[in-house]
Amino acid sequence: MQKVDIAVVDYGMGNLRSVSKAVEHVASGKTVVVTSDAKVIHGAERVIFPGQGAMPDCMRELDSRNLHSAVIHAAENKPFFGICIGMQLLFDHSEEGDTAGLGLIKGNVKRFAHDQMFDDKGEKLKVPHMGWNQVYQLQAHPLWAGIEDATRFYHVHSYYAVPDNSAVTAGATEYPKRFTSAVARDNIFATQFHVEKSAQAGLQLLSNFVNWKP
Amino acid sequence: MGLAKRIIPCLDVTNGRVVKGVNFLELRDAGDPVEIAKRYDDQGADELTFLDITASSDNRGLILHIIEEVASQVFIPLTVGGGVREVEDVRRLLNAGADKVSINTTAVLNPKMVQDATARFGSQCIVVAIDAKKVDNQPFEWEVFTHGGRKPTGLDAVKWAEYMVSLGAGELLVTSMDRDGTKIGFNNPLNRAISNAVDVPLIASGGVGNLQHLVDGIKLGGADAVLAASIFHYGEYTVQQAKEYMQKCGIEVRL
């Protein structure tokens, strides 16, 4: 079988083309495949786990394609990057549809609370949180290399993760309260924001991942 | 500091070219869509919107090809609209590299399609476009029009916006037909009425002639993003200049 450098997990959810195009852009000479084959995921050197839409659907599709154990195996053994729902799925549980996650990181996923969505001028903040917001780097990490603190990344989501252990929080965003927008532990890095749609900063982060040796 | 207000250049595409009209008519050629998209990305555009304004079946392949090409070179969100009739159209556009799909006439003819599309792909990628015009013959101020602004619907634009959000629309693109192409500014009362009525982000569209209009769209109209075409296409202003001006006026932007 062909040697795969980077596998983008396809479980039928989200804009995989955007993810694969961005990865191909920063990983010249490497083999990037979009796949729903557990064997390919097992054989890949590193794995990207994207996701879009609703968490219950994502979890159901993951199960129906029998990718559950391949994703857990990858997250425990090789450089692993989760994006958006691909980050939320790493947690124990989500309020969205009362859904159990993969339980790789302790914590829960919650919805932005309607009654608290006002900025400091009293203007209503919209949900979904959509657009370019600043990400504060709360711990040093090789994936932040070449990216200034408080750089803006493209977010679009109505739910956010709350880790039990704040030590896994690699980055945070304010809307209006500070929430965890990037997590890191061992060989796992995951972002709530869309690196594949965050222009130069996002490409830099993906490039750092492609070359990361945890 | 927090979420930046977005500037979205809009590319009206027909027969593989970017064009711009006045009040939805009188089209002028503005150039190659891929080149224009790259230029706006370089200038710091926050997103790009492509509207396939002829959207006949023979054109459909062309816009997919354009989106594929743009998506492999430009890494910011891309919205595509025009002639989206069924859930399968949404899937095709997303597969070509679109991040969001804008639905306009079909939302009026078949609201369930909005519901089906958001259930399948998520609210985040379904934008409902509303073309509204001020009217005197109705018990409300702004009426929804379809078919590129040709057909009145009898629908109140504000109520319609609320209904679309209740079906799952993740964002609204509101175009004032009275203002489109006129360069006299957004219809801020219309945008404010809709923005106050819904929780999802609102993109203001139609009528930008100068940079103060962008500022007014946000401060007076309550828009979360501002869309403009001709001021950027013909080189009057760059996106960068627009953002610098907005920042000077106290609006948070991504520079």
Image (cartoon, coloured by chain):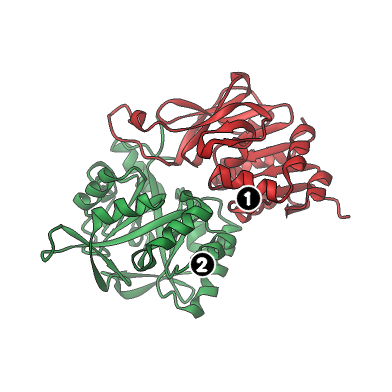
- Mark 2 lies on residue: B89
- In the picture, the disc for residue A19 is 1
Q: Name the side, left or right, on which A84 lies relative to A143.
A: left
Between A166 and B160, the residue placed more toward the observer is B160
C-alpha distance separating marks 1 and 2: 20 Å
**Quarter of the image that includes the C terminus of chain B:** top left
Between A62 and A77, the residue placed more toward the observer is A62
Q: Which of pointers 1 and 2 indicates the residue nearer the eye?
A: 2
Image location (x, y in percent) of residue B33: 49, 66
Three-letter amino acid code of the residue under disc 2: Asp
Image location (x, y in percent) of residue A46: 77, 41
- Tell me, yes or no, whether dots 1 and 2 are on the same chain: no
Q: Give the image quarter of residue B92.
A: bottom right
Above or below for A158 versus B230:
above
* Residue at disc 2, secondary structure: helix
Residue at screen point 57% across, 58% down: B71
Q: Residues within 10 Å of mark 1 (few under 14, many from 20)?
A: many
**Whether residue A173 can be seen here:** yes
Residue at screen point 22% across, 50% down: B188
Between A168 and B116, the residue placed more toward the observer is B116
Q: Give the image quarter of residue A108.
A: top right
Chain the render paints red: A
Above or below for B64 versus A129:
below
Above or below for B22 versus B228:
below
Q: Name the side, left or right, on which B191 lies relative to A186.
A: left
**Whether residue A149 can be seen here:** no
* Residue at disc 1, secondary structure: helix
Q: Residue furthest left?
A: B136
> Chain B hue?
green
Image location (x, y in percent) of residue A177: 42, 25
